[in-house]
Amino acid sequence: MAHTSLRAGLAACALLIGLASTAAERPVGSISARPTVPLDSHAMNAMLRADRDKDGTLSREELERYDLGLARRFKEVDADRDGKLTLYEFEKLVSPPETLTGR
């Protein structure tokens, strides 16, 4: 019986080692991690200017300092209601509506 559990434990370890090595070999930024929607360079540049603390998101305060008109629509585009805008949420503010219909 102990022989069977030793064999099962060794098999589990081999499986875990195989999974870890596969993950380690996968390049950072692989295709699967990239968004399927092309990014709007205008929105990206605007967000880089507005993101004062450089955390990759925009708080309402950062957006108010950048553009009060856009800040008024903050709640409208904060889809996950976390109080911060991601690039994709911010893109909804700065992109013309006709460019967003196919997404």
Image (cartoon, rainbow, N blue to C red):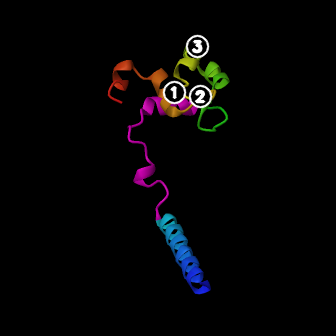
Asked which secondary structure carries label 2, the reply is helix
Q: Are marks 3 and 1 in contact (CB under 8 Å)?
A: no
Residue named by callout 2: 50
Which residue is most to the bottom? 3
Residue named by callout 3: 72
The image position of residue 16, as x and y in percent, is 54, 70
Instruction: Give the mark nearest the N terminus, 3 or 1.
Output: 3
The image shows residue 92, relative to residue 1, as above or below, that is above
| Residue 59 location, quadrant | top right
Asked which secondary structure carries label 1, the reply is helix
The image position of residue 93, as x and y in percent, is 49, 21
Specify few, some or many for label 1: CA neighbours under 10 Å numbering under 14, 14-19, or 20 or more: many
Stretch of the chain drawn in magenta: 26-49
Residue drawn at x 54%, y 68% is 20
Give the alpha-carbon distance from disc 3 to disc 2, as whole Å. 15 Å
Q: Could you tell me which quadrant the C terminus lies in?
A: top left
Q: Are marks 2 and 1 in contact (CB under 8 Å)?
A: yes
Amino acid on which the number 3 mark rests in the picture: Arg
**Viewer-nearest residue: 7 or 91:** 7
Give the alpha-carbon distance from disc 2 to disc 1, as whole Å. 10 Å
Amino acid on which the number 2 mark rests in the picture: Ala
Q: Nearer the viewer, mark 2 or mark 1?
A: 1
Q: Is residue 13 magenta?
A: no
Q: In this view, does 83 lie to the left or right of 26?
A: right
Instruction: Give the mark nearest the N terminus, 3 or 2.
Output: 2
Which residue is most to the front? 1
**Viewer-nearest residue: 22 or 94:** 22
Amino acid on which the number 1 mark rests in the picture: Phe
What is the number of the mark on residue 90?
1
Q: Do the residues labelled 3 and 2 touch (CB within 8 Å)?
A: no
Q: In this view, does 31 lie to the left or right of 71?
A: left
Residue drawn at x 38%, y 41% is 36
